[in-house]
Image (spheres, rainbow, N blue to C red):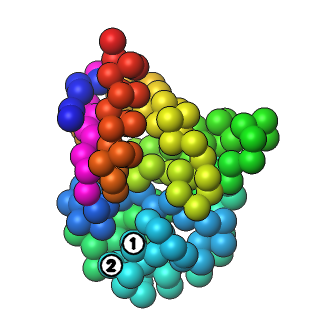
């Protein structure tokens, strides 16, 4: 599914983010940049040790922020590592921090001349963010950013399951009515 937002394309696909050929992919990292399970583990396994070497040099990343490394053995040239919030009850700035994680990733992409990037669904796995809320926050943040036309041509959300894809599809339809 694809929508034109300003001069950029916003796309939703079901798939494996480690196979993306966008200029950069976004990693749902932990604040220590230590690798882990889910998307984070998959990206580190597919990208090889070069990514972890750079992560160790960087040292860490606060929640709501992002850092960039090489793409290692991935098709994407770069990996933008962002740290989404752990969901407690929605009353601990989770929405603001989640939005910031997406916005920080987009800002780093633009700063590095990246034209296309792919996001996973940040914080909705081990961090427990309810996906219905997270999808709306993610899509609204990205749409607001690309409407301001900062040079991105494609922002793709790569959703791992049919269920996640359907949630994002419904959210995108709602936001683009």
Mark 1 is surrounded, within 10 Å at the Cα level, by few (under 14), some (14 to 19) or many (20 or more) other residues, namely many
Q: Nearer the viewer, residue 171 or 17?
A: 171
Secondary structure at numbered mark 2? helix
Image coordinates of residue 79 in percent, x first then y, are: 40, 64
- Which residue is disc 1 drawn over? 43
Query: To which quarter of the image does residue 170 belong?
Result: top left
Image coordinates of residue 31 in percent, x first then y, are: 66, 65
Image coordinates of residue 84 in percent, x first then y, are: 60, 52
Mark 2 is surrounded, within 10 Å at the Cα level, by few (under 14), some (14 to 19) or many (20 or more) other residues, namely some
Q: Nearer the viewer, residue 176 or 69?
A: 176
Secondary structure at numbered mark 1? helix
What residue range appears in magenta? 6-15
Residue 10 falls inside the magenta stretch: yes
| Residue at 51% in and 73% down | 37
Residue 101 visible to an observer of this rendering = yes
- Which residue is disc 2 drawn over? 46
| Residue at 34% in and 17% down | 176
């Amino acid at each position: 599914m694809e929508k034109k937002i300003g001069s950029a394309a916003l796309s939703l696909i079901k798939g494996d983010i480690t196979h993306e050929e966008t200029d950069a992919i976004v990693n749902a990292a932990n604040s220590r940049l230590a690798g882990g399970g889910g998307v984070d583990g998959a990206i580190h396994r597919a990208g090889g040790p070069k990514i972890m070497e750079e992560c160790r040099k960087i040292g860490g990343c606060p929640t709501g922020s992002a850092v960039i490394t090489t793409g290692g053995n991935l098709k994407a040239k770069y990996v933008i590592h962002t740290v989404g919030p752990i969901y407690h009850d929605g009353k601990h700035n989770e929405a603001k921090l989640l939005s910031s994680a997406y916005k920080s990733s987009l800002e780093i992409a633009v700063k590095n001349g990246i034209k296309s990037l792919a996001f996973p669904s940040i914080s909705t796995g081990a961090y427990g963010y309810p996906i219905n809320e997270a999808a709306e926050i993610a899509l609204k943040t990205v749409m607001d950013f690309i409407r301001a036309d900062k040079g991105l041509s494609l922002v793709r959300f790569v959703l791992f399951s049919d269920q996640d894809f359907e949630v994002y599809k419904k959210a995108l339809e709602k936001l683009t009515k």
